[in-house]
Amino acid sequence: MTTGPATTEVREGDPAPDGSGPLEAARLDRSTYESVSAREFALMVKNPDAWAGRKIVVYGVITQFDAATGTTAFRADIGPAPMADPYDYDQNTFITAHDAGMVADFVETDMVTMFAEVQGSLTYDTQIGGSTTAPSLLVNIIETTNLSSPPSARPLPPPAPLPDTE
């Protein structure tokens, strides 16, 4: 008796064996993420659990990405719009990446744009012995934020002529 290779029935709508499929396509479809206003962002920060499952675009700076956070999670200060100065982002947020490979080249101080799903709130222990609660996001797409460079400095005017001393 000979047996052939095992076959698996794939039905319409099922994810493909390689992980692609409708769910993967929706996760990577930027048009399914909403930009939020400063007010909407403040409401999300105030009650992240009420926003769980919503897909939003946020901008920020990575503030901790090290052995303590692991290879798929990091802390970032974020906001609803890109900022030129990383210190303008002031909302501490816990970010978990969909997979380690997508964040492997990012490090602390990188300015990023993230397409993420709100997971709710997360309480974690701090290094100084307390705890803090912050919004938790699952990032599905992350990229370096490219801000237009500031205008170049204008050239100095030519020096004024010296007065005649003759």
Image (cartoon, rainbow, N blue to C red):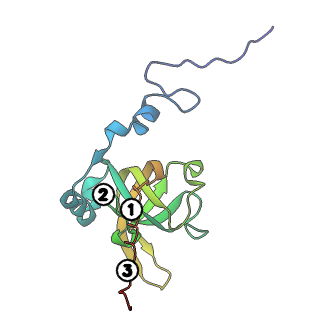
Q: Which residue is mark 1?
A: 150
Q: Tell me the number on the disc at residue 81.
A: 2
Horizontal placement of 31 versus 97: left or right? left
Q: Which residue is located at x 54 percent, y 33 percent?
A: 19
Query: Is residue 34 left or right of 28 when viewed as pictured?
Result: left
Q: Amino acid at mark 2?
A: Ala
Amino acid type shown at disc 1: Pro
Residue 99 position within the rendered picture, expressed as x and y whole percent measured from the top left: 55, 48
Measuring 53% from the left and 67% from the top, which residue is drawn there? 108
Image side of residue 80 versus residue 139, left or right = left
Q: CA distance from mark 2 to mark 3?
A: 48 Å
Q: Residues within 10 Å of mark 1 (few under 14, many from 20)?
A: few
Mark 3 crowdedness (10 Å alpha carbons): few <14, some 14-19, many ≥20: few
Residue under label 3: 161
* Farthest residue, direction left: 39
Image quadrant containing the C terminus: bottom left
Instruction: Looking at this view, name the residue that lies furthest to the bottom.
Output: 165
Residue 160 at x, y percent in the picture: 36, 79
